[in-house]
Each structure stands twice: as structure tokens, then as C-alpha cells.
Amino acid sequence: MSKNYRDYRYFENRPDVVRVWDDLDSYHNWCRFQLCEFNPADLYKKESINYQAYLASKRPRRPYQGNKPFNRQRNEQNFSR
């Protein structure tokens, strides 16, 4: 008996394939905005300089803690008058 493929939703059952295409779109957009050369073969290749820069841009940043107080005594010791 043949399988009914009308009931089979390929992309709903394969989230790994969807993730690859989403990552490729995201990498393409990053290269487009950064004016870098886009090569789809560089996706997931950590030796590529462009892909390393893309991964670095996606890293979470530390939140801004506000201005640190200026330590005048320490600063005066470092400079001679």
C-alpha cells in the first residue's frame, strides 16, 4: 500500500531543516548589511573569518552598568606634576 504524502508535512516534521534555512537567511542578511562576501558554504564553518565575525555579533552582551565613579586619588598618583 502506498503512503499518502498529502497528510505528511515535511517542514513541520523536520525542524532541523527549517533551522538550517533560517540560519542561512540570517547569515545572508548579516553579510549583506556588513558588506562582506557571502558564501553559503561558510555556514557552520568556524574556520571562515566572516562566519566567526557573524558568531561574535550574535553573542549576548553584558548589560550596561552605568558610569563608574571617577577615582581621583588613583588618577593623581599615575601622573606627575
Image (cartoon, helix red, strand yellow):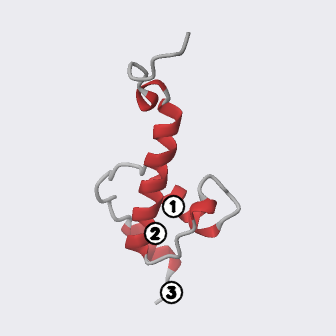
**Residue 18 placement (x, y as % from top left):** 46, 39
Determine whether, in the image, residue 71 is placed left or right of residue 2.
Answer: left
Numbered circle sitting on residue 81: none
Upstream in sequence: badge 2 or badge 3: 2
Residue type at tag 3: Ser
Residue at image coords 66%, 65%: 48
Give the spatial CA distance, label 2 vs label 3: 49 Å
> Which element carries disc 3, helix, strand or loop?
loop
Numbered circle sitting on residue 80: 3
* Image quarter of the N terminus: top right
* Furthest residue in direction top, as rendered: 1
Pointer 1: what residue? 54
Residue at image coords 29%, 59%: 67
**Residue 72 placement (x, y as % from top left):** 37, 69
Residue type at tag 1: Tyr
Residue at image coords 48%, 49%: 23
- Whether pointer 1 and pointer 2 mark residues with C-beta atoms closer than 8 Å, the reply is yes
Pointer 2: what residue? 31
Residue type at tag 2: Cys
